[in-house]
Image: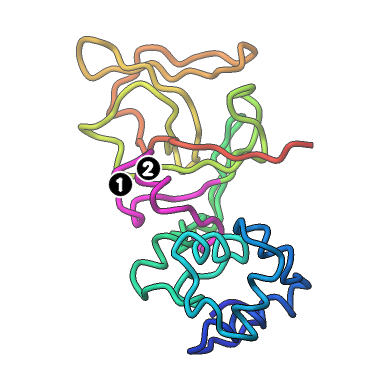
């Protein structure tokens, strides 16, 4: 259910209630869908036309951010079309891009939600294998800064391990670092993007525990 709007079997009642609650006038909505100023009023009050055309209905549904079925559309994949966002759990730990963050509490809770089509475009991992983690420190600056939230693919380690930024666990500390995979043997170099920090060259994979690959980052712009 859309907040503030009572679902009605009559799309006319729904549309009129949306107009009242959101302060929209009929003439403006008529122009929005490319009709004369009286079109919406006639639809609501006189029943002409009997049904909105598909293009008109879709435009109004997107404008009001409601499922198209509320305005007389078919009760098909409204969720996929209009917003069934996929929640991704955020761990109550931080991955250090600095001296090291000790994870005291690894409980997770929903914090971010993504459009499923966008999410599918960047990863094939199931949602259960994704996690949001907060970055601390500046060793990965300017790529990642303190306070950035990173989306981590927990399935992208082991045999799938490749060059890129990963979250690692070293001595119960979570680190976010860049891994450069050596072309021969199971060896890696652990790198910091900030030149003020040194690298750890020629590490064996047994020396690090890869938690996941960083596939997206979000940050506040001050």
- Residue 33 picture quarter: bottom right
- Image quarter (top left, top right, bottom left or bottom right) of the C terminus: top right
Q: State yes or no: discs 1 and 2 in contact (Cβ < 8 Å).
A: yes
Number of the label disc, if any, that sits on residue 25: none
Asked if the magenta segment contains residue 119, the reply would be yes
Magenta region: 107-133
Residue denoted by label 1: 125
User: Where 90 sits versus 199, above or below?
Assistant: below
Up-down: is 110 above or below 179?
Answer: below
Label 1: few (<14), some (14–19) or many (≥20) C-alpha neighbours in 10 Å: some
Secondary element under disc 1, as helix, strand or loop, is loop
Please count the marks in the image.
2
Q: Residue at x 33, y 71 (%)?
A: 76
Mark number displayed over residue 153: 2
In the image: residue 204, left or right of residue 33: left
Foreground mark, 1 or 2, reads: 1
Q: Quadrant of residue 69?
A: bottom left
Query: How far across and down, in percent of the image, does residue 62 sit?
Result: 56, 60
- Marked residue nearer the N-terminal end (1 or 2): 1
Q: CA distance from mark 1 to mark 2?
A: 7 Å
Q: Is residue 7 left or right of residue 78?
A: right
């Amino acid at each position: 259910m859309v907040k503030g709007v009572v679902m009605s079997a009559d799309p006319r009642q729904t549309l009129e209630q949306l107009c009242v609650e959101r302060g929209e006038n009929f003439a403006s909505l008529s122009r929005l869908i490319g009709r004369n100023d009286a079109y919406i009023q006639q639809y609501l009050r006189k029943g002409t036309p009997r049904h909105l055309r598909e293009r008109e209905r879709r435009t109004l549904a997107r404008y009001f951010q409601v499922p198209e079925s509320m305005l007389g559309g078919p009760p098909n994949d409204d969720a996929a079309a209009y917003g069934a966002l996929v929640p991704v759990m955020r761990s109550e730990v931080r991955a250090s891009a600095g001296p090291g963050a000790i994870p005291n509490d690894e409980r997770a809770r929903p914090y971010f939600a993504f459009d499923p089509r966008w999410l599918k475009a960047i990863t094939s991992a199931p949602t259960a294998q994704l996690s949001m983690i907060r970055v601390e420190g500046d060793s990965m600056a300017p790529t990642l800064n303190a306070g950035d939230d990173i989306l981590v693919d927990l399935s992208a380690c082991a045999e799938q391990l490749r060059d890129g930024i990963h979250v690692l666990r070293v001595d119960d500390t979570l680190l976010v670092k860049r891994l450069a995979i050596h072309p021969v043997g199971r060896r890696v170099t652990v790198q910091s993007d900030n030149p003020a920090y040194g690298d750890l060259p020629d590490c064996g994979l047994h020396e690090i525990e890869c938690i996941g690959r960083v596939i997206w980052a979000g940050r506040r712009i001050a």
